[in-house]
C-alpha cells in the first residue's frame, strides 16, 4: 500500500462503498421505477426467482439479475434459496412518501 500503511479491510470496504454509492443509488431507482421491486413485493413471503422477476417486470433476465444483486447489496431485498423477497428497507424504498420525495430530489437535482 502506498505510504507504508497497512491494509485495513474495513476501511477498504467503507471507501469502496462510497465510491460505488452513486451506482447503487441508480440500481435502487431503476429497480423501483422499472417495477422490479414491485413484483418482488407482490410475491409476498414466497419470493421470486430472477427469471420470474424478469417475466413479471417485463425486463431482460440480465437486467433483473443486475438490479436484484444491487438491491441485495443495499439490503432492499433478501435472498433465500435462490428466491428474492422484499425487506423492510425495500418496502420503505418502494412505498414511503418521504423516502420517495428525497430519492426523486437526489435523482432530479443532484
Image (spheres, grey):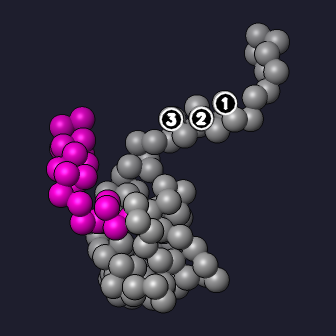
Residue at image mark 2 = 14
Where is residue 29 shown, x and y percent of the image?
Answer: 31, 57
| Lateral position of residue 21 relative to residue 57, left or right | right
Q: Which residue: 22% across, 45% down?
A: 102
Which residue sits furthest top?
Answer: 3
Q: Which residue: 52% across, 85% down?
A: 49
> Disc 2 to disc 3, how far (Cα)?
6 Å
Kindly indicate whether the residue at mark 2 contacts the one at mark 1 (C-beta within 8 angstroms): yes
Where is residue 22 shown, x and y percent of the image?
Answer: 41, 42
The secondary structure type at the circle numbered 1 is helix
Reply yes or no: does residue 47 show up in magenta. Answer: no
> Disc 1 to disc 2, how far (Cα)?
5 Å
Q: Which residue: 24% across, 35% down?
A: 110
- Camera-near label (3 vs 1) is 1
Q: Which residue: 39% across, 79% down?
A: 40
Reply yes or no: does residue 92 show up in magenta. Answer: yes
How many neighbours does mark 1 have within 10 angstroms: few (below 14), some (14-19), or many (20 or more)?
Answer: few
- Label ID, residue 21: none
Where are the magenta residues, as a range? 90-110
Kindly indicate whether the residue at mark 3 contacts the one at mark 2 (C-beta within 8 angstroms): yes
Q: In the rendered image, is residue 59 in sight?
A: no
Residue at image mark 1 = 11
Sequence-wise first label, 3 or 1: 1
The part of the image, by quadrant, that contains residue 44 is: bottom left
Q: Quadrant of the N terminus?
A: top right
Q: Looking at the magenta stretch, what is its main secondary structure?
A: helix
The part of the image, by quadrant, that contains residue 36 is: bottom left
Residue at image mark 3 = 18
Q: In the rendered image of this protein, does residue 103 appear above or below residue 51?
A: above
The secondary structure type at the circle numbered 2 is helix
Amino acid at each position: 500500500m502506498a505510504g507504508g500503511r497497512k491494509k485495513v479491510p474495513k476501511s477498504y470496504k467503507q471507501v469502496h462503498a462510497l465510491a460505488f454509492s452513486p451506482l447503487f443509488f441508480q440500481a435502487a431507482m431503476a429497480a423501483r421505477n422499472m417495477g422490479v421491486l414491485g413484483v418482488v413485493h407482490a410475491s409476498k413471503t414466497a419470493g421470486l426467482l430472477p427469471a420470474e422477476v424478469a417475466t413479471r417486470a417485463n425486463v431482460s433476465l440480465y437486467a433483473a439479475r443486475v438490479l436484484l444483486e444491487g438491491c441485495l447489496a443495499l439490503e432492499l431485498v433478501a435472498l433465500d434459496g435462490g428466491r428474492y423477497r422484499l425487506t423492510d428497507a425495500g418496502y420503505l424504498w418502494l412505498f414511503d412518501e418521504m423516502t420517495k420525495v428525497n430519492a426523486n430530489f437526489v435523482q432530479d437535482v443532484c
